Amino acid sequence: MKQLLWGVVAGAMLAVNPTLSAAQGSLDHLICYRITDPFKVSATVSLATELQPEFRQGNCKLIKATKFCVPATKQVLQSTTTGPNIVGQSLRDDYICYLIKCDQTTLIPPKLVADQFGQRKQGNYRPFEVCVPARKGAPPCSKVSRRQCGGVCPDDPATGAPLACRMDSATLQCTCEPEQCTGKPDKAGQCGGQCPTPSQICHPGLDAAGNKACVCQDPPPPPCGLNPATGTCGGTCDDPAAKCILITTATGPACTCQPPVDTCARLPGTNQCGGPCPPGLVCTLESAINDCRCEPPPQNCGPNPSTGQCGGVCPVGSNCRLITTGTTAPACGCGP
């Protein structure tokens, strides 16, 4: 049976204001539990008490752990004795207390001490226990039953990825392995874990029963965009019926999603032409009629073999026209 011990802050305080109120909610107490601790301690320590040098101990052997203490706040429900209300410093750490055996060489004289339960004279001080700060932690990865593992694994030291405690089917031992893509999405709708196929990623989806689950899927294709290496458009559009096509803008070529066009026509919302044409022809904006029609691919600026007139493609800001100079015969060229 666990024995509950209240540790209270005490000191040699004869002149204490009895009207001082203890701060409500301050963790200035320790609640201690007797424990069963299989740890075999082997240590000898020196205990310095800088604030009260007469209590120092120079050679103490730790025997065994006897108590586990945690910070607490108490409320007195009933007491037949009273003393000054004393507020201690807030505590945060847990403590493990060890029985000690010290080579005591000096006699500590009796002290007049006080706590909120009363004032009295104490004496016969003998070193008995030392309490050291401690931390509670989850148990490491290990067997919790014959076929089940449990506990905490550290992150992968190489990649920083989380590891999971799993049973190795070959050795039937618990081991820390990378998280697998299983379970359900978290509260944010996200999934994590490794997939058997390296090219796949763990995404929210549906299991065989149609329930939300984390499943391994091929990564989604990129959205409609321009491939700088090839100058072509590719990717997916929000509208499955739309196509990712190349258009010319004031800042240069760009890709946009447009509904499919059955014939050569002006693309909705643009001054561009698009749509199918017979082989060898392209859908081009004809300036004479300000409309789209299928024509041979535009040639560089030069004379038309049939008419002799200049025509063809020139850089933006210039036109294909007949240029006359004083040294050469008139010829087709790009000019303002």
Image (spheres, rainbow, N blue to C red):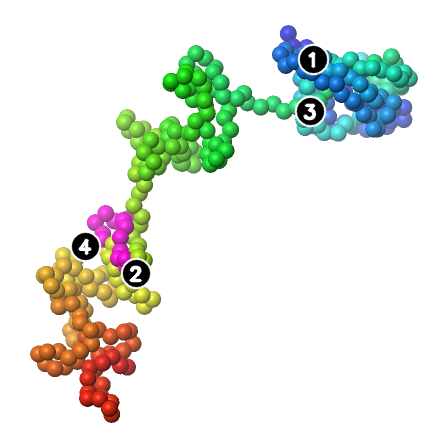
- Tag of residue 133: 3
Q: Work out how far the residue at label 2 is from the one at label 4, CA to CA, in angstroms.
A: 17 Å
Which of the 4 quarters of the picture holds residue 211?
top left
Q: Work out how far the residue at label 4 is from the one at label 3, CA to CA, in angstroms.
A: 72 Å
Kindly identify the amino acid type of the residue bearing the numbered disc 4. Answer: Pro
Quadrant (top left/top right/bottom left/bottom right) for the N terminus: top right
Please identify the residue farthest to the bottom as the structure is shown: 326
Kindly identify the amino acid type of the residue bearing the numbered disc 1. Answer: Lys
Q: Position of residue 161 (x, y in %)?
A: 46, 34
In the rendered image, is residue 3 in sight?
Answer: yes
For marks 2 and 1, give the one nearer the viewer: 1
Compare marks 4 and 3 and give the one earlier in the sequence. 3
Compare marks 1 and 4 and give the one earlier in the sequence. 1
Give the residue pinned by disc 1.
64
Q: Work out how far the residue at label 2 is from the one at label 1, CA to CA, in angstroms.
A: 76 Å
Give the residue pinned by disc 4.
260
Residue stretch rendered in magenta on the structure: 230-243
